Image (spheres, rainbow, N blue to C red):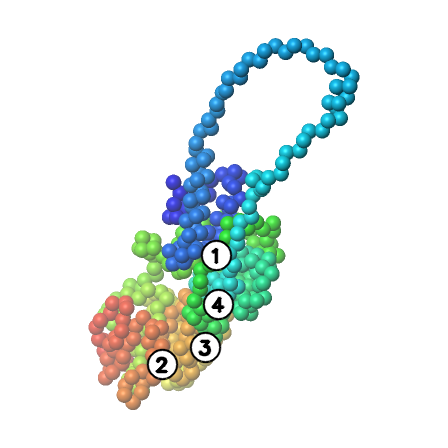
Amino acid sequence: MITVKNLKSEYPKLDQKKLPAPLKADQFEFIRDNMDLYGDAPKITALIDAFVAELNKYAEKKSEPKKTETVAKPTEPAAKPKTKTEREKRAKKTTKPKAAPKTNIDKPKKPEKTKVSQNEMWFIVIRKFVNYVGNPVRLSTLYNFVKHFQRDFQENPNRTKTTYIKQIRYIQDVTIKAVNKNLKAETVTIEIPEYKLKQLQEIVETHKLDYTINKRALAHKPLSGTSKAFKNMDDALLKKKSKIEELKASNGIVSSNDLVKMSFDTLNFTGDWRKLIGKPTVPFHVMFYGRGGSGKSTIVMQFAHYLADSFGKKVLFVAKEEGQSGTTKAKLLRLKANHANIDTAEIIPSDALLKHYDVVVLDSVNELGLSPDDIRRFQKKHPKISTIQIFKVTKEGKFMGANDFQHMVQAEFVIENGEVHAEKNRFGGTETIKIKFEK
């Protein structure tokens, strides 16, 4: 028996050639793409339930054996030979059979259609796109996403009446460009400006969607061709199926059973670094702050050397405060922190250069003039790069900057009186260590 839970696995086993039109593969794709709304949207839930019910009816009919009845025909008496006159023969040839009366019984009734608000239709597209931004999405998922809403957008005569016309065109252009740039990749991460994402998020948060689904969803005709933007796409990519990637593509959800099977790159720190920080996963994002002269740059420089020397990490130290100066040189020599895997800079270099580093030190975030949005964009553009962020403090001893900075790091370390301790730490370190100003 086919259920909502096993629909994705059982449907491909059916003979597609013998399925009736309302149950064809393109109808199933519509159901599959909106499966994440099952249980939350009453109309979509009813639509999926109806689809599953029709599949089971079809399966039951197919399994029933055909009954053949033999009816005994009565024997007819032998007919007496008749002789027909020429007039009777001519009358039989010229007589026309009477036409059967016309009835409307056999005429199929056209399915009724329910009206769908244009804003409601395109709100679903915007909602899905917002979930895709910043997350790795399967190439085939993006392909189907654009293919489906392009079809409705082009075939719908009232498409220009929606208030979201500009947003829909923007989503179409961005998605097609992202796909065309990554035709050989398995997954694609869509990146858009922060202000654009906020605009789309506001639409999702404020719009109350009435989940009214047009009944033609189960009767639309399959496309005869595909968009020109995807002609070069390898068909083999569309056949690849990955349960985890599919879940990530829909809403970024991974089941607990799959999560415990996943492996993460963990740095097995030892000694004082294990006591202070714990065992961070890669990439990590941490912040250090303290008063001037407290040893912020010193402890971070030692930390950078530990990462480069013990784990082979390529580190870029962006020293905006002290720069590439004699002070920085003296500190490197005093701490013996110079290393072949550590480079220095006074400004953040281009993206083309950044991709060669594993860790970037920002000394300091205040002097570099970075905002929380700048840090977010940096982390989205370079999801594999870890950051060590240094901050100045206010007169009260609190770090200088918006509270958003704290929400974007996994660990927060305070430097006071030559010691370092964690104010927040998700990596397990709990102890306080003393700063060694010389090695």
- The answer to whether residue 279 of the structure is visible from this angle is yes
Residue 348 marker: 3
* Residues at marks 2 and 1, CA–CA distance in whole angstroms: 44 Å
Task: Indicate which disc, 1 or 3, sits on the residue closer to the N terminus.
Answer: 1
The quadrant of the image that shows the C terminus is bottom left
Q: Is residue 51 above or below residue 202?
A: above
The quadrant of the image that shows the N terminus is top left
Q: Kindly identify the amino acid type of the residue bearing the numbered disc 4.
A: Glu
Task: Indicate which disc, 2 or 4, sits on the residue closer to the N terminus.
Answer: 4
Task: Indicate which disc, 1 or 4, sits on the residue closer to the N terminus.
Answer: 4
What SS does tag 2 mark?
loop
Q: Kindly identify the amino acid type of the residue bearing the numbered disc 2.
A: Ala
What SS does tag 4 mark?
loop
Position of residue 202 in the picture relative to residue 425 (left or right): right
Q: Residue at point 55% right, 13% down? A: 75
* Residues at marks 1 and 3, CA–CA distance in whole angstroms: 50 Å
Position of residue 251 in the picture relative to residue 294 (left or right): right
Residue 191 marker: 4
Marks 2 and 1 close (CB-CB < 8 Å): no
Within-10-Å neighbours for mark 4: few <14, some 14–19, many 20+: some
Residue 402 marker: 2
Within-10-Å neighbours for mark 1: few <14, some 14–19, many 20+: some
Q: Kindly identify the amino acid type of the residue bearing the numbered disc 1.
A: Ile
The percent position of residue 311, horizontal first and vertical second, equals: 34, 65
Marks 2 and 4 close (CB-CB < 8 Å): no
The percent position of residue 200, horizontal first and vertical second, equals: 47, 70
* Residues at marks 2 and 4, CA–CA distance in whole angstroms: 24 Å
Q: Is residue 279 above or below residue 336?
A: above
